[in-house]
Image (spheres, rainbow, N blue to C red):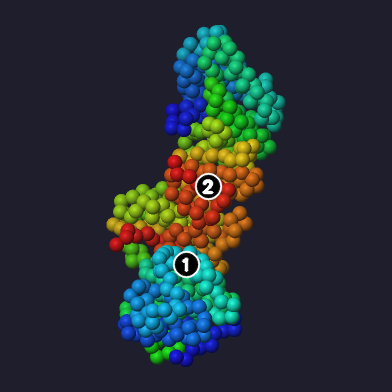
Amino acid sequence: MAVTPIQAGGFEHGLGFFGSDDEFAATFTPFCRDALEQDAPVVVRVADRYAELLRDDLGPDAGVVFAAQGDQYQDPPGALRNAIDLIERHSHPTRPVYLLGELPPMTGLGRDAWVRYEAAANRVLDQRRVKALCATDTRGLDASLKDDLLRSHHVIVDADGSQPNPAFTTPEVAAAARTPVRDPLEHTSPALQLHNPTPGAARHAVARLAAASGVRPAQIDDLLVGLSEVLGNAIRHGTEPVQVSAWSVAGKVVVAVRDSGSGPADPFVGLLPQGEPGERVGGLGLWISHRLCPQISLSVDASSFTVRMAVEAAA
Amino acid sequence: MADQTGRRGDHLCWAYTDPADLHQRAVAFLTEGLSRGHRIEYLAAGAFADLLDHVAGLTDRDTLLLEGRLGIRSLDDLYGVDEVVDPAVPLAAYAAATDAAVEDGYTGLTVVADATPLVRSDEQRRAFRRYEHLVDRYMTDHPFAAMCAYDVTALGWAAAAELACLHPDASDGSTGFRWYAGVGGSVHLDGEVDIANMELFDDTVALTLPTAARSVTVDGSRLEFLDHRAMLSLERQARRHDIKVTLVSDAPVVHRLADLLGLRAVRPQWQ
């Protein structure tokens, strides 16, 4: 396979497409072989059935580290932290670390945060000697999601080999250009609308609304923390009027906090690892919201900034 | 006013806008004191005759007064205009008065005090808040009960909240959280702390966090919400004094945030 040379000392982020088990093996076995031939560490974190396909191709003791998927994609900032830890654990003095993983769950409002996560990885990891490849199932892949992902990956890999990705752009542009995500419930009238509420009033109103949703109380608690943090930001940093809307149906609760400002300047706000406790002075509210409520989207339009969050009962 | 905190409604803050309503509450609080066998006292600014009128609703008021069971005192005789009260002075006075009541055969002392003139300026209020916490701790192991009244029309709601939050019980709407003394040097934290009252919380902890022992227990069994700023405030202040804070709470938010924030000086504990 023709492998695009890694950027000097930097992070190479690849998007690997497959549409069948055969294509999975054909696309990702060469990536692992390339690492093994260079004597570089290679860590694979994919579903068991895909790991089996690679083991079949590479042989049982090829030297690939198969890491458990666990809850690696529980939330975007946690996943970034995990990725850094994984890289540090497997780093090599002269060789890049090869990482093969599946894409995060690009569903619901969470798609917005995970698309930003894919772009943020390019910023956070840009000084790391890493070749990462995101295994992407093309079956049912939404066209706008594919466009979003192409902006944040340097190379495209498929069963035919690897090539530079002309759609790649800077992390900031990639984040800014992402497709807006809405929850379908927003097409219905909100069950609750509050104008310039205090965080306490908003928490109590949403808690009352969510009580009948059937969503687990612990998830609702997390949503209320996120709501409080996001609304606190809107009050402190945003522009009035601030509006809180909420929807609740069986198995799902959605809240949206809109203020009339332009939102935070940092496109990766809420995603990046934080410093030591006690040294922290701000910017933590959205980070906490992303950690506790990964179904979260941020959007800016001409006249407002909106944060949406959702919690759902497990299927 | 009995509650589950171990405090028996012994320290109540009444932030009022209607004096007639306050006087009614005062009479009810003093009557409760009588039912506990306490000596009672009413303290406010103004002429004696006016103060006597305020507690006109007390059954057998004049008899109680003659027996020495009811005391009525004017703040005007005790403090100068705009005086900044040394927190130790009223504390010592009430401790002595409580002892005297017990020596005289009563089970304790119950006081209603409208201290509005003593908390008009920031400096006055700061000193008086220290006193409020000291006397609150005194009440945890002495037969002394007090209702502290503050006139919101004179002070504003924000100033009233600075005082109300230091009481185990406070009139509706006067404060979002309550930070008050518990047994064995512990502190209780009830209610909700978020961006709306974070600065007050931070300042209240700075003013009153017990730092003499290496560790302090904060009983959050009636804590409903605490945001990350409040958690970090506790962490920062605990570190500054090199103490450990055990925050006892079954509120999931407390445990989730402590974990996420990687707190070291503040240790959450399930009840």
Inspect this view and state whether residue A166 appears: no
Q: Is residue B111 above or below residue B195?
A: above
Image mark for residue B249: none
Q: Is A146 on the left or on the right of B84, as rendered?
A: left
Secondary element under disc 1, as helix, strand or loop, is helix
Quadrant placement of the C terminus of chain B: top left
Residue A68's x, y, as percent? Answer: 41, 69
Inspect this view and state whether residue B108 appears: yes
Q: Nearer the viewer, residue A107 or B126?
A: A107
Determine whether label 2 and label 1 are within 8 Å by CB. no
Residue drawn at point x = 54 percent, y = 11 percent: B105
Quadrant placement of the N terminus of chain B: top left
Can you identify the residue that label 2 sits on? B267
Q: Is A246 on the left or on the right of A42, as rendered?
A: left
Occupied quadrant, residue B270: top left
Marks 2/1: CA–CA distance:
25 Å
Disc 2 chain ID: B
Which amino acid lies under the numbered mark 2 shown in the image of this protein?
Arg
Q: Is B93 on the left or on the right of A271, as rendered?
A: right
Disc 1 chain ID: A
Q: Is B220 on the left or on the right of B213, as rendered?
A: left
Residue B13's x, y, as percent? Answer: 53, 31
Residue drawn at point x = 50 percent, y = 54 percent: B259
Can you identify the residue that label 1 sits on? A79
Residue B217's x, y, as percent? Answer: 54, 39
Occupied quadrant, residue A191: bottom left
Q: Are marks 2 and 1 on the same chain?
A: no
